[in-house]
Amino acid sequence: MVQDFFTGLDGTVEYAGIDSTDPYAYKVYDKDRIVLGTRMEDHLRIAVCYWHSFNWPGSDVFGSGTFDRPWLEPTDDPIGAARSKMDAAFEFVSKLGIPFFCFHDVDIAPAGDTFAESAANLDTMVGYAEEKMAATGIKLLWGTANVFSHPRYAAGAGTNPDPEVFAYAAAQVKHALEATHRLGGANYVLWGGREGYETLLNTDLKQEAEQLGRFLSLVAEHKHKIGFTGTLLLEPKPQEPTKHQYDYDSQSVQGFLDRFDLLDEYRVNLEVNHATLAGHSFHHEVAYAVDNGILGSIDANRGDYQNGWDTDQFPNSVEELSLAVHEILRGGGLGSGGFNFDTKLRRQSMDRMDLFHGHIGGIDTLAQSLLVAADMIEQKTLTGARADRYAGWSGDLGTGILDGTESLESLEAKVAAGDLDPDPVSGRQEYLENRINEVIWKRGG
Ligand code: XLS
Ligand code: NI
Ligand code: NI
């Protein structure tokens, strides 16, 4: 008998429109609404993450768990408890009415005393997930391996100074990749939480980069060997828990992939709060990835501008997200990716029903951002201004420079002959800011 955990809500969260006062209804997210020719649900491909929502008891470094999570209570039946947790997760995602979930191996299956036991536990729980997915229609956006929490990974997984730890991480990632494949996952993620360093005093940067490149090549080889057709994704983050993480941001990941000839094998999973930790805006990270052909998927959340760490709060700013969603639409959408809510409740949000409030607000914010971004695309609010700004590059001089016809000598000759007389023009930043606000305000955002 499957127990119901979210009895505070009988049915499912439905779209009720902006005039509804029901806190358990979507005000904007209307999955079947067509936006630029595509259903809203198919644009956004929203996922709930297992770790923050179902595994985390609300503990922080100063205190223990505060959350009401009956499925996390101590037990002498770890597989039974993992099943209850999965019941809770699937009940929640079904009631939320969104299509995907994401997990780490250790989120869904208890650790055993040996690798073989842990792997067997994962297989058991993957079997249970298959049943749950078949019964609910919920799909897997991505799976991943947690190769950062266990003490053996304190000095890194693929970048560990000990090759035995590399081997252990390789075994764990292989198994998690196969579990993701078995569940029909659309992507597989690698977040290198401890692939970095605490101090340069004991770190051989050259050696660790070689190891990481090799690790990623092995994963790509295995993906093809087992016939997994999902996308491999690297998730950049500049630091935390390490002082410095190698997958710092999209640009450094792109350089790393290029160096190890892996640009065809990997894309990026960009997280809002990781972008801001790196000193970028999320808009920057997305725009960079789109323009360099490496955008894969998104971990939706937000940081706190007063704090320097990964607070993983639920997104609530349409203004901030609209700009990023606009770049995504401009780039042709997310493909196999989606918006995974890598989001945490605040520690004082103890009630399990708070999980609904966090997700409903975040999903509506995202939906509103999609509408704003679609308006911006249709009105060419930014694309038109950008095209005008670079129009000179389609003329004879611009094409001649880029295609190699011109040299420094020929350019000097043109300038010296007085043929060219460039006129500085306005970048119109304030004008563009106003146009964006108009779109947002017209949408009632
Ligand atoms: C941590 C990361 C992590 C990844 C999955 O900061 O966001 O949650 O998304 O390992
Ligand atoms: Ni993440
Ligand atoms: Ni994060």
Image (cartoon, rainbow, N blue to C red):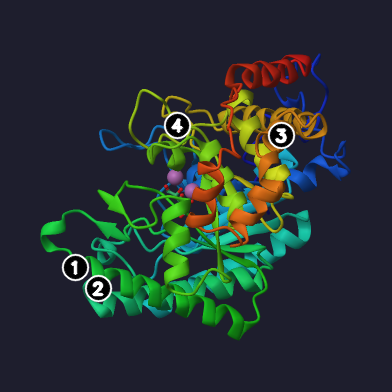
Please state which of the two labelled residues, at mark 4 or mark 1, is closer to the viewer.
1
User: x%, y% of residue 119?
Assistant: 47, 75
Residue at image mark 1: 204
- Mark earlier in primary sequence (4, 1): 1
Mark 3 to mark 2: distance in Å?
47 Å
Kind of residue at disc 1: Asp
The label number, if any, that marks residue 388 in the structure image? 3
| Residue ID for mark 4 | 303
Sequence-first disc among 2 and 4: 2
Asked if disc 4 and disc 1 are in contact, CB closer than 8 Å, the reply is no
Residues at marks 2 and 1 touching, judged by CB atoms closer than 8 Å: yes
Cα gap from disc 2 to disc 1, whole angstroms: 5 Å
Secondary structure state at the residue bearing disc 3: helix
SS at mark 1? loop
- Where is residue 428 drawn, in percent x and y? 61, 21
Q: Is mark 2 within 8 Å of ligand 1?
A: no
Residue 385, quarter of the rendered image? top right
Disc 4 secondary structure class:
loop
Label 1 and label 3: CA atoms lie apart by: 48 Å
